Amino acid sequence: MHATHPRAHAAAHPNKIAYRMAGSGEAITYGELERRANQGAHLLRSLGLKAGDHIAFIMENSIAFMELCWAAQRTGIYHTAISRYLTPDEIAYIVRDCGAKALIVTPQTAEQAAPLAGQPGLSLFMARGVRPGFRDFDAERAAMPDTPIADEVTGYDMLYSSGTTGRPKGVKKPFMTEPIEKLPPLMKVLCQDMCGMGEDTVYLSPAPLYHAAPLRFNMIVAALGGTSVIMEKFDAEEFLRLVDAHRVTHAQLVPTMFVRMLKLPDEVRARYDVSSIRAAVHAAAPCPADVKQAMIDWWRPILLEYYAGTEGNGVTVINSTEWLSHRGSVGRSFVGSIKVLGEDGAELPAGEIGAVYFAGGPAFAYHNDAAKTAGAHNAQGWSTLGDIGYLDAEGYLYLTDRKAYMIISGGVNIYPQETEDVLILHPAVADVAVFGIPNAEMGEEVKAVVQPRDMAEAGPELAEKLIAFCRSRLSALKCPRSIDFLAELPRTPTGKLVKRHLRDQYLAASR
């Protein structure tokens, strides 16, 4: 029986590194992690926080982030990690919406929390620094016992959706009285059983920790006794250097990271040995088929893809061997059975495109938003993340796009992802967004906004070349009628394209 909590590893290997920061080199051993997590749990209890209560925190990638997560995990407290890139208004909304009784910040994120000073029932703390108006989290924690609290029970993350429309919503798992050593079933199967994670794992984490996948992967690595190397910020060449230097065995990435590594000069890519990687997990956004093929050619067939949301209502998984014979698929059902539904809500046969639903998956609710929760479910209780796609005859799922971004031109459905997947392959393109804009005759037409490798090349000549490149691979209907250029496209730090910001600007300009 494998040990499945940092406490067991602290007892067996107290001096083993649990977490290491890639840039600064700061590290924490399992023994230190256990003591600080216990002290943090005592501090949370001293504030009157009990199982089922909420805390929130805004932190850059750091050891302190993981210490706090492990303190909350053993107290039964829902913990909400908030993106440091949100505005003060957005942060205040989340803190109030989740009902946080404590908010922990760092010197780098304190300004964004300043409007919350004096909010009734909210204790404001600062970790890794001291500032007027904030209690000293580290000092108060250090004064606490480093032994376990008497009433340990599993706490859960409660993270907020990206908020493609309106305010982001918290995804709340029902509270269950579970022992702290119990692994989440999905993460156990995905990480331990399928990826082979264990005590010998060296995991490289390149994404912001407030996002669901990086947070949960870094938690599971410590639960299984491995070592996580956490990047402060992703950089393509630095990622490869760290793989080589630390003999990294596992990583979780998003497709934009693959694109940036593939576009490094050949001599840079050849400089680093990546043969130690046993499994590279990717999700969060669609991966262009040619990009994935190039990564498999480079790294070997070790890519493991899954499709899921923060909601956890269903999951598909596909390994590289399966993908090579089902190119473009995100896999077969792993949690929940897949249903593809037409406009009338009826189930569609294999090969027909419709809304993707999961049946029989774990229950979830959007915190304080019964209408959004109801909107994500149909009459049978099946739930959707808002994506569209189709199943093949063997039950493999293929995503075509998010429903919100489908373009209808002359009555024909066009899926922007297909066009984006072609344009990103052009050597002059660093990033691309495709969406629909109004057209008096056709209803909508295809628009592309491109981030060029070199902004000096941007202009009508490059636009013509890119449209011709697209038309050599896709029907003219799917290709942009016009292309604009931007020095940088709006992406979240987790790699998701915030297409609505671009589209809204063009829609406003057309009115």
Image: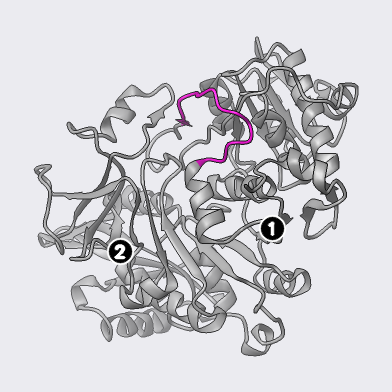
The magenta segment:
170-184
Q: Residue furthest bottom?
A: 267
Nearer to us in this view, 449 or 280: 280
Give coordinates of residue 107: x percent, y percent. Answer: 80, 37
Relative to 403, 54 lies left or right: right
Instruction: Please tell me whether residue 172 belongs to the stretch shown in magenta.
Output: yes
Magenta-colored segment: predominant secondary structure:
loop
Q: Amino acid at mark 2?
A: Pro
Q: Position of residue 423 (x, y in %)?
A: 38, 76
Going from N to C along the chain, the mark reached first, 1 or 2, is 1
Q: Which residue is mark 1?
A: 233
Q: Say whether residue 28 is visible.
A: yes
Disc 1 element: loop
Cα–Cα gap, marks 1 and 2: 29 Å
Q: Residue at x 60, y 50 (%)?
A: 217
Kindly identify the residue that appears in the image at 55 percent across and 75 percent down.
455
Decide which of 444, 66 is in the foreground and name it. 66
Say what amino acid the circle numbered 1 marks. Lys
Residue of label 2: 416
Q: Is residue 400 above or below residue 78?
A: below
